[in-house]
């Protein structure tokens, strides 16, 4: 039997190539090609884009990306066992799929791609958060990529898009929303995966802004928000004592009440504070 794209169904691919999911690699596979095509569509029109896919595994999402018309896909997979299955997809889409057997945390494949570049991944959650942080903190902005479409544990997705005043609002929200438009575009129950994980998942789409939403030095903003959120329930005049000098005066100058707590403060005010700290 063949699937819509003319390749064998993913269950068969997994059996043929003996790709039993490994917990150590965070392997929870998507086997429904309608679903993977839907995720690929959330990344936008890919026909003029090079796509970096991290963690293709047996290739469900890879096939979705190619079927949806991606100009080229560069797939980086740590598990050598998946190479045979991915080679079959590559042969089916001549010249459009390049596969690299490597740890995505160890290499920077973006340098091999031609802009415009989009990044799409269904990754183990710890690797996903680490890569997201790296992609959001390149040396120069705008970054090499136009957008990121990434699967996360739903709780992490909520932290990325959280607004001030919510329990999940913190450093990840500030880092993400400072330089991108971020939104949750799909939610998936555990049963969507094989084997099913313990938690719900969500796809977040982040579009790079041409420049940060408000001016600030990335390093100073990171330092100030780290300090502010380390004790998120404390008043800022106390949690930011480590900045030294007249912290209350600094907060007031930034338009922030010294008695406010980090979780109440929006991005604009954190950036104002970071600019004042940098200027001191
Ligand atoms: N994309 C496939 C899908 O949707 O069915 C697989 C998703 S599975 C959640 C995560 C994949 O990432 C696995 O294939 C795993 O081997 C791979 N992976 C885990 N850590 C990785 C790393 N550091 N670099 C590259 N791939 C990694």
Image: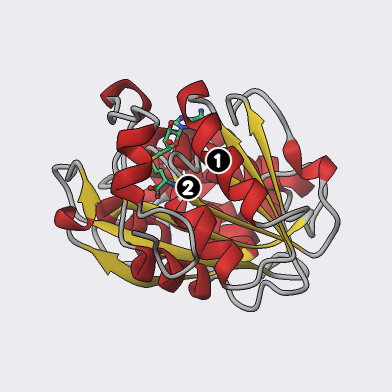
- Residue depicted at 50% across the width and 43% down the height: 56
The picture quadrant where one finds residue 38 is bottom left
Relative to 136, say whether 146 is above or below: below
> Which residue does the image show at 59% across and 27% down from the upper left?
105
The C terminus lies in quadrant: top right
Local secondary structure at mark 2: loop
Q: Quadrant of residue 188?
A: bottom left
Residue at the spot of label 1 = 86
Q: Nearer the viewer, residue 169 or 191?
A: 191
Work out whether residue 268 or residue 191 is closer to the camera in this orientation and state it: 191
The answer to whether one can see residue 266 in this image is: no
Regarding ligand 1, which quadrant of the image does it lie in?
top left
Residue 53: which numbered mark, if any? none
Residue that label 2 marks: 59
Is residue 104 among what the camera can see? yes
Q: Is residue 46 left or right of residue 161?
A: right
**Residue name at image x 83 percent, y 41 percent:** 111
């Amino acid at each position: 039997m063949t699937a819509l794209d003319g390749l064998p169904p993913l269950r068969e691919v997994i059996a043929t190539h003996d790709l039993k999911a490994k917990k150590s690699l965070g392997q929870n596979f998507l086997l429904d090609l309608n679903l993977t095509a839907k995720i690929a569509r959330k990344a936008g029109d890919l026909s003029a884009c090079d796509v970096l896919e991290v963690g293709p595994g047996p290739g469900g999402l890879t096939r979705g990306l190619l079927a949806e018309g991606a100009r080229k896909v560069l797939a980086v997979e740590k598990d050598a066992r998946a190479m045979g299955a991915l080679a079959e997809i590559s042969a089916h889409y001549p010249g459009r799929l390049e596969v690299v057997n490597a740890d995505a945390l160890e290499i920077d494949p973006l340098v091999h791609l031609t802009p415009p570049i989009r990044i799409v991944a269904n990754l183990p959650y710890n690797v996903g958060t680490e890569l997201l942080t790296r992609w959001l903190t390149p040396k120069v902005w705008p970054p090499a990529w136009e957008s990121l479409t990434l699967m996360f544990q739903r709780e992490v997705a909520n932290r990325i898009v959280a607004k001030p005043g919510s329990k999940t609002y913190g450093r990840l929200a500030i880092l993400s929303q400072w330089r991108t438009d971020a939104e949750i575009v799909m939610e998936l129950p555990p049963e969507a995966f094989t084997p099913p994980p313990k938690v719900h998942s969500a796809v977040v789409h982040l579009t790079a802004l041409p420049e940060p939403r408000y001016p600030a030095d990335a390093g100073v903003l990171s330092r100030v928000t780290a300090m502010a959120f380390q004790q998120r329930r404390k008043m800022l005049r106390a949690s930011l004592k480590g900045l030294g000098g007249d912290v209350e005066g600094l907060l007031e100058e930034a338009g922030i009440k010294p008695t406010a707590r980090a979780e109440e403060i929006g991005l604009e005010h954190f950036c104002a504070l970071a600019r004042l700290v940098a200027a001191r």
